Amino acid sequence: MKSGKKSEKKSKKTLKKKKLSSNITTIILILIFLVGLSVMLYPTVSNYINQRHQSKAIAAYDEKVSEMKPEDYTKYFEAAEKYNKKLAKNPSAFYNPDEIKGYEKILDISGTGIMGYITIKKLGVELPIYHGTDEGILQIAAGHLKGTSFPVGGDSTHSVISAHRGLPSAKLFTDLDKMEVGDTFTITILNREITYEVDDISIVLPDETDSLQIEDKKDYCTLMTCTPYGINTHRLLVRGHCIGTGEPQHIHVTAEAFQIDPTITASVMGIILLIMLLIRVLIRTRKKGQEGKHLKCNQVFLHLKRGDLIGNNKKTK
């Protein structure tokens, strides 16, 4: 009897150890899976969140513009054109932009720093344009390089719009290297949409700025980002010249009507289904372990009972 009880205790301890080891292994595998899945989905989810932010900012800007009167447009454009003329007469302001005062207030109709937005249909990109190129701006949108012309069109102007590329959290200018001569992009400022056609693509060092200077009687806009991808030792410049000015033709989706990207929906549904599957597997594994435990206990009990019966039979004899 004593040896039977010891054997039963050992069996219980062994079963507990195996069960604990199995559960720990399962939990570790689930955690590894979830971490890997999170890393894989991070760029998609982050880009979706960033695009939603951009869409809301542009929709809010368009709504603000629609509430303005014609005389308001005139006032803002006149201030921007006045700044551009001063810039054309003072080339040193490119390197020392604070020589011309009032930059931050020009074209800032909502107090958010947004002066308009850029649309590159070929790349599927539409970004709000903020005053300046601070790191905080370039992480989420496009920035207007202070010391260059405001992108309102006109002779002797050269605007520079910059954005990051290669960020895991946002697309921005990641695909700017896919632009070719002859492609177009548009800049929307207030009720004015200016279309530019790409006529020059170049790669320069950060301190090579000759190609960003104003040229007499020319209306240029250059898109700038870092290159090579992930190394960022040079600058990719995509320059366009104005081929037309008109009123914006497209209507933006408001923040409330912003649709969730099907990729995000599919990913979330996939995660939920996988988690449910893992939970089911874990429960089934646990049940099997319990069934195995009961089976072994029953076998031990029967073995002990049989031993008692045999012993009793021997005594009877």
Image: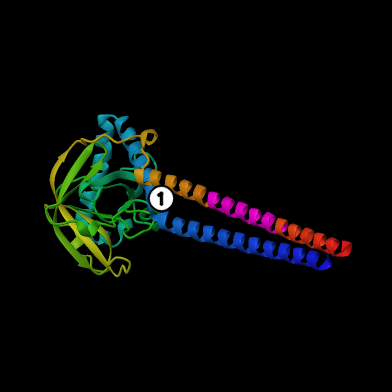
Quarter of the picture holding the C terminus: bottom right
Could you tell me what secondary structure mostly forms the magenta stretch? helix
Residue at the image position 79 percent from the left and 63 percent from the top: 307
Locate the N terminus and report the quarter of the image it occupies: bottom right
Residue 213: quarter of image = bottom left
Residue 105 appears in the figure: no
Q: Is residue 178 visible to the viewer in this orientation of the structure?
A: yes
Res 223 quadrant in image: bottom left
Circle 1: element type: helix
| Residues packed near mark 1 inside 10 Å, few (<14), some (14 to 19) or many (20 plus) | many
Span colored in magenta: 279-297
| In this rendering, position of residue 70 left or right of residue 140 | left
Kind of residue indicated by mark 1? Val
Q: Name the residue under label 1.
A: 45
Frontmost residue, 207 versus 126: 126
Which residue occupies 23% across, 63% down?
A: 236
Residue 165 placement (x, y as % from top left)? 31, 59
Residue 259, image x, y percentages = 36, 38
